Structures are given as structure tokens and as C-alpha cells.
Image (cartoon, rainbow, N blue to C red):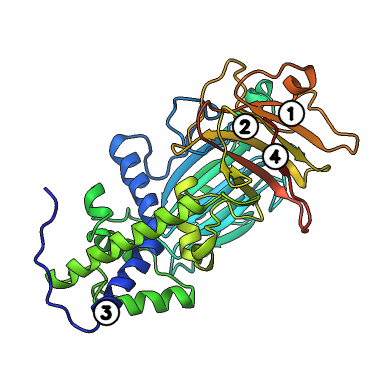
Amino acid sequence: MPETLPAPVPVPHDPEVVRAAAEAAVWAHPALLGYRELRTELRTGVAALGLLDHDDGPPVPGDGTRSADPLLLRSSAWLDLRAEPAVVGHADLPAGLYSGAQVIDLLGRTVAHVGAARTGTRAGDWAVVGPGWDGPVPPGVRGVLRSTSSLVRVLTRTAVPRPGDLPAARAVQRAYRVRPLHALGGVTPPRPAPSVAWLPWDEERAWGAGFVDYLALLLRLARPTDPADRERVERWVRLGVLPGGPEGWGAHGPDARTRVLVARGAALGAAQLEDALRREGLGAAAPAGGAGGAGAGSASLRRAVAAEHELHAPEPDEVRTLRWRAVDGEPLAGHRRYRMTLPAPVPARLHWSLAAHAEPSGELVANRARRYALGPGTPDLPRAPDGALVVALQHETPVDAAGRAGWLPVPPGPFSLVLRLYAPEPGPGWSPVLRAVG
């Protein structure tokens, strides 16, 4: 049954508490989505702390993924750094292929990227250390990645430009490794860390007033280091939205009266996020997660929107993502025909992909051609006289040969387009052109 709380007697600072709770709910949204995934995967046995779980293949229709790249293999691991650091490494990577690993803290912030785009293709290991750790690392470790949380997630991504490249991509994917520091030798294995007192995941609690319970737990495991974030958290504590201080977050929840105000703030934050999601992608090519309109000024809101599309997405200088949901003010729909022109050269050093996803689910939709994305490995993509790539976007098969060669089948109903540039080239001025042709 929903939590029933008495209506509070109004006092002058009530609106400030509600606004602060809304701000906290939006700020915490990516972290809560990550916690939900962590708890679900650990509870169901999909993942175990310290083990890298590999996807068998790229995303396909019906597998439940949302806004995922159909030309990519992923692996995921959750690492506990409380007893000792972990080590993330890879073998030599093939030249010209996108492959990389991302380390993310419990608040959803990227700790580091390693791999072809950032650190090169040479084999290596990196020590991932938690807050307060200051010990030695074995010789040969290429670097130390410092996390502000004692648990982190590692995501690896490996491009599959063509279907025939899947076996080679799997070999690259499985060459990524995560290990405890003592596995490299020269370090005494430590005592295991005590079990974490996890909160069971409850959707109603997490997206209502109870979001502060989860946020308090996460803040005990992940201290924000950004001065602006710390000021926000301290203000939420002063207003009673969050309990205690840096040494006591989460010891006691807000009192019953404040909890009613927090519930109102959670509802306000949810409405702000819903509005930003509705606005996102309705203009010209815009970075995925750019809220546009009133939400454009809020970095927290942009992060929340981006997390709704792709949880723990890479940083923009690792993978630049553009999204469209409309053209000329009209939502994209499968009963119409569109053309997209990608000026040459596409500014991506290692890989790019263009995919269509059903709206609002973000899922891939099956089509007769079994083609779910275009990329540099797509054969015979048609080009304009100036070298630009020309893509046909429609549900039905194009009647002409050039259209079929450059055809990206789209869902029959509303859809969005997602273009990803892996290891993007710096510099402004490059922008695809999308237009309706029928």
C-alpha cells in the first residue's frame, strides 16, 4: 500500500524544502538507476562482485535493451574496493577498432576511460582504488584510477562493424579482465570486507519520499568531491531533506512532517524530468541528454535525461552521441520517409553507428532486412557528389538500388535516431542534415 502521511502544518520555509527535495531527486536519479541495476543483478545472479559478465552478442530486438548500439558488444562488472584495490586490464587491442573500458562510481560519475580512444592499444593494467587508499602497486601497473566511492562499475565496449566481425570482437571483449590487486603478486591478500547493508530495491519507495533513504546509503559509500555537489548535499542536510552530516548520513530518515515535503519534492523532480525528456531531441541535432528549453541550464537534469536513455553512458570526448526525435517540428514516424546526409568525413577516428529505436520504449524493432544500424562496415553506402553519405530512413524497402544500399529500416510508429561517434574528432562545424522526403 502507498505510504500515507499526515499533511504538514505550513511554515515559511516549506517551499524551500520542496524545491531542495526536487533538486536532490533529479541529482540522485542516475545514482538510483545504477543502484537498481546493481541490486537487481546481484540478487538475480546475473552478476557477482569482482566478475566481468560478457554479453554474447550485440543488442537485438526483443532483448529488453533501451537505446543500445546494435554494433557494439558490452561487458559489465561491479567491484568492491573496500578491502583492497581492483585491477582493470586488457591485452593488446587491434589497431583501428574501437574498444574501451569505463570505470564509474556509485554516484554515476565517470572515474576514467581506458582503451583505444584514450590510452592506446598497448596492453596494460590500471589499479582502481577507493577513497583513502594510499598503498603500493605492483610494478608494471600503468596507472592508478582514484574513485570517490568504495564500489565501482566497469563497462567495456567493443565495436562490431560487420556481422562477420563478431568472433574477433568477442576475442577482444574477453581479453578484458578485472582482478583483485593481490592477484598481481607481491601483495598480501587482505581480509574480506564485511557485507554491505544493502537496502532492498522498491520502485515505489525509490521514486517517492524514500529516495532519500537510498541516497543516504549511496552517500555513505560515495562522497562527492565536486565543491558544488558538496554544497548541495550540505544544504539538503541543513533543510532536513537528508539526515545527519558527512559521518552520519542515513542514520535516521527525515521526520514525518519533512517526509511529506520530500514526497512533494520527489513528485516535482519527476515532473521536471518528464518534461525534459519530452523536449529532448525535438530540435536539430543535439547531444543526447540535452534537455533543451528550461532544462538546458541544469547539468543535473541533463545527466538525468542522459541516464534515462543510456545508464552510465561514455563521456562525450570518448563517444559523442546525437539524438533526433523530430524534424521540422514533427515527431519522426515510420509512415513517412526521411533522408539523412552525413558530411564527409564522419568525424570519428575509430567507429560510428546510426540506429533507429521505437519511441518511447527505446527498443530495437525487428525488420525483414535484419539491419538495425549503419556504420563504417556497412557495404556500398551511397555517396553524394561531394562524398557525403546519404541514408534512406523509412519502414518500407526503398524501390531504388541506391536507396536499398543506404537503407536504415525504421519502426512503423514513432521512433528516434541515435548517432554515435567513437573517438570523435575535435572541432565544431560538422552536423548531419535530416529532412523529410515523403
Please state the horizontal and vertical placement of residue 250, each as a whole percent of the image. 23, 67
Is residue 188 shown left or right of residue 364?
A: left
Is residue 388 shown left or right of residue 359?
A: right
Residue linked to disc 2:
71
Please state the horizontal and vertical placement of residue 115, each as a whole percent of the image. 65, 47
Asked if residue 129 shows in the view, the reply is: no
From the viewer's perspective, is residue 166 above or below residue 320?
A: above
Please state the horizontal and vertical placement of residue 122, each as a whole percent of the image. 72, 46
- Say which label, 4 or 1, has the lower sequence index: 1
Q: Amino acid at mark 4?
A: Arg
Look at 42% across and 60% down and name the residue there.
Answer: 107
Q: Amino acid at mark 1?
A: Gly
Tally the numbered discs.
Answer: 4
- Say which label, 4 or 3, has the lower sequence index: 3
Look at 70% across and 39% down and name the residue there.
Answer: 435
* Residue 173 position by quadrant: top right
Q: Secondary structure at mark 3?
A: loop
Q: State the mark number for residue 239.
A: 3
- Say which label, 4 or 2, has the lower sequence index: 2
Q: Nearer the viewer, mark 4 or mark 2?
A: 4
Q: Are marks 2 and 1 in contact (CB under 8 Å)?
A: yes
Residue linked to disc 1:
377
